[in-house]
DNA sequence: GGAATCATCT
């Protein structure tokens, strides 16, 4: 109070005089306005309000607009301010004014969770929503995915005759879109008496979100046919549909359309969506050209480049872009770091991975799902399985990705028992395994020769977890049986498959033929494989190895010749290894590396070791 | 009232 009295405020200064004399002060209107404007807090407004309440007719409307400036939607406003605002409503003269103030309050708080309570209070008082109220409240429902409350608002909008308003419809569509109920979005859209660009964009976005990229594209062209010009936001969602489809010609076509619209082209959102589209459609060069020409770039632009390159398998290039990003002093965010960790996993760059880990700790970046899981994966793939396990154990919130990364990590590092132990912890943690988890579990069993255990888990997939085994899982089972020497059982297994066996399944059987020297069966399987994947060399190589193992050199040579005639080249075996923080990458036949011979020996030893543990095929290593 | 980037796989 004392602090407050020190402030220069004409009315409050005069209040001293008022307190000491018997006559109320006369306050000119301009002074009043000035005083109100200079109020810095709810408390000051309340005092001003108290002082003026007896001397002037209520200035509630003015006070109302002032109090709104203290309601900050981004931070939670003080309960004092909000409660005062709610009290003020009772002093407003007409229901119309009351509704207006409720609308302003709701709009100011639209990103907080208090909105629904305010709305209910308003309706309870007999003040009914209009075409502004419903969209504001719905926006808050969408933010909190409050489906049930959204349904109630939907019902209210019908009850109060607001449901044909395009704003109301669009925000309703948006609510159902974020809740993932595309059916409702579509129904609302179809029933709309009026549709604008936002309606179309919301519909397209809903399709994209639920993975119906083709429907999204169809809707986009329908929109164009309805003579509506897309704007930035529409283009961004349409481009993301192209990304999902991986359809380069479609994406390019839409890009060409954008070129017609000038101001859209320089938009950073559109630019980022284009970079992402070219990357996901496999055209890294166009993505890079676009990226370099972008007049404005933000962290998302860089992330799109880096993670795009990672998805393309261009890990080194991804790390170069990351270095450039650091060069211009742009701070990486968690998306950047996930992509960088992913590149580290694939290149075996343990040192950089550790650096990222330290960076995360130092900058107190929340080790949320993505980051934690990427760290587990990075350590596991770089062979630091105990570090991976440490991160995993330290994670507060583990999801199915965390468990799967750890299971696959243990399996890869030859620790089948520990992989299965982690798997057995999942039910207690309330995490349901998914299809990929079972790939990890089955491959752990396969590499450890745990036939019965593997069989049991395979059966549990559908029996306990209601997951339909896919070709990957059949492939794992064939691998499991084949490695254990149960070749005819593996064959029978394939015969009884309810789905069409693919290259992985046949490949697993061919691998078993190699281990157990089954030449004739190998020949049959190879034909199957070649029929499925004529352009791939894997089957030929495996088969020629089978011939060589059986000392049938002539056949082996014949096969290699056939490969040459078909202009097939053996994909160069590529491997990388980190020694003293330096990553050495090798290709078969590469003599350029100064320390090649030394490392070649090391790799050969590793290859033998890993092969003995059944973990890696020879073709991954230089022999 | 509507927009972009990130994770587990034989």
Image (cartoon, coloured by chain):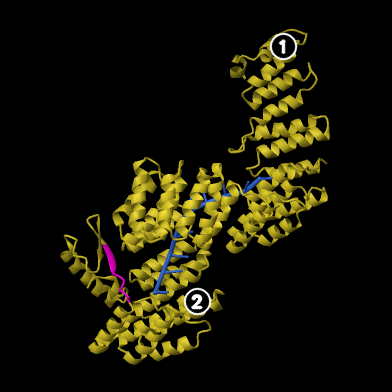
Chain colours: A yellow, B blue
Which label's residue is closer to the chain start, 1 or 2?
Answer: 1
Mark 1 vs mark 2: tell me if same chain: yes
Q: Quadrant of residue A562?
A: bottom left
* SS at circle 1: helix
Lateral position of residue A581 relative to residue A314, left or right? left
Residue matched to label 2: A470
Lateral position of residue A4 relative to residue A382, left or right:
right
Q: What span is in magenta?
A: A567-576
Quickly name the residue at label 1: A19
- Residue A615 % position (x, y): 32, 74
Instruction: Tell how many labels.
Output: 2
* Position above or below: A185 against A573: above
Q: Give the percent coordinates (x, y) of residue A301.
A: 45, 47
Q: Is residue A278 magenta?
A: no
Above or below, A100 relative to A191: above
Please tell me which residue lies in front, A196 or A367: A196
């Amino acid at each position: 109070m004392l602090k407050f009295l020190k402030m220069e405020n004409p009315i409050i200064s005069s209040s001293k005089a008022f307190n000491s004399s018997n006559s109320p002060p006369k306050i000119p209107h301009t002074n009043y306005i000035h005083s109100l404007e200079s109020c810095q807090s709810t408390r000051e407004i309340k005092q001003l309000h108290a002082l003026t309440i007896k001397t002037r007719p209520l200035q509630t409307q003015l006070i109302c607009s002032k109090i709104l400036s203290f309601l900050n939607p981004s931070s939670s406003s003080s309960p004092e301010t909000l409660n005062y605002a709610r009290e003020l409503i009772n002093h407003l003269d007409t229901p119309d004014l009351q509704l207006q103030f409720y609308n302003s309050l709701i709009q100011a708080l639209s990103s907080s969770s208090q909105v629904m309570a305010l709305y209910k209070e308003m309706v309870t008082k007999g003040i009914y929503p209009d075409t502004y109220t419903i969209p504001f409240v719905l926006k808050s429902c969408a933010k909190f995915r409050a489906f049930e409350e959204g349904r109630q608002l939907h019902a209210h909008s019908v009850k109060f005759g607001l449901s044909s308003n395009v704003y109301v419809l669009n925000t309703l569509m948006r609510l159902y879109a974020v809740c993932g109920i595309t059916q409702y979005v579509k129904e609302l859209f179809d029933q709309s008496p009026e549709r604008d660009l936002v309606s179309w964009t919301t519909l397209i976005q809903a399709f994209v979100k639920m993975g119906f990229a083709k429907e999204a594209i169809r809707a986009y062209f329908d929109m164009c046919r309805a003579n509506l010009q897309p704007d930035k936001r529409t283009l961004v969602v349409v481009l993301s549909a192209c990304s999902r489809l991986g359809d380069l010609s479609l994406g390019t076509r839409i890009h060409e359309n954008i070129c017609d619209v000038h101001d859209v082209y320089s938009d950073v959102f559109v630019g980022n969506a284009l970079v992402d589209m070219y990357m996901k459609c496999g055209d890294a060069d166009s993505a890079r050209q676009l990226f370099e020409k972008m007049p404005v770039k933000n962290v998302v632009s860089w992330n799109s480049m880096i993670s795009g390159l990672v998805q393309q398998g261009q890990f080194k290039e991804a790390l170069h872009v990351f270095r450039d990003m650091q060069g211009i002093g742009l701070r990486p965010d968690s998306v950047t770091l996930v992509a960088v960790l992913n590149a580290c996993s694939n290149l075996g760059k343990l040192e950089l991975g550790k650096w990222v880990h330290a960076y995360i700790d130092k900058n107190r970046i929340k080790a949320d799902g993505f980051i934690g899981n990427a760290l587990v994966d990075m350590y596991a793939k770089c062979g630091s399985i105990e570090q991976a396990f440490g991160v995993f154990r330290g994670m507060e919130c583990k999801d199915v990705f965390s468990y799967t990364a750890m299971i696959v990590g243990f399996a890869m590092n030859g620790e089948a028992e520990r992989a299965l132990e982690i798997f057995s912890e999942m039910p207690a943690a309330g995490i349901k395994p998914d299809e990929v988890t079972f790939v990890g579990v089955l491959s752990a069993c396969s590499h450890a020769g745990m036939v019965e255990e593997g069989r049991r888990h395979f059966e549990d997939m559908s029996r306990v977890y209601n997951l339909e085994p896919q070709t990957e899982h059949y492939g794992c089972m064939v691998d499991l049986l084949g490695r254990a020497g149960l070749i005819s059982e593996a064959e029978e297994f394939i015969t009884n498959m309810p789905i069409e066996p693919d290259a992985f399944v046949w490949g697993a059987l061919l691998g078993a033929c190699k281990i157990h020297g089954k030449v004739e069966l190998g020949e049959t399987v190879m034909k199957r494989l070649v029929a499925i994947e004529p352009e791939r060399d894997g089957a030929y190589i495996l088969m020629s190895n089978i011939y060589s193992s059986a000392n049938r050199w002539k056949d082996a040579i014949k096969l290699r010749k056939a490969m040459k005639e078909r202009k097939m080249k053996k994909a160069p075996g590529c491997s990388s290894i980190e020694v003293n923080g330096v990553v050495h990458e090798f290709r078969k036949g590469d003599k350029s590396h100064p320390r090649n011979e030394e490392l070649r020996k090391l790799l050969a030893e590793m290859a033998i070791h890993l092969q003995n543990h059944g973990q890696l095929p020879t073709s991954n290593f230089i022999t």
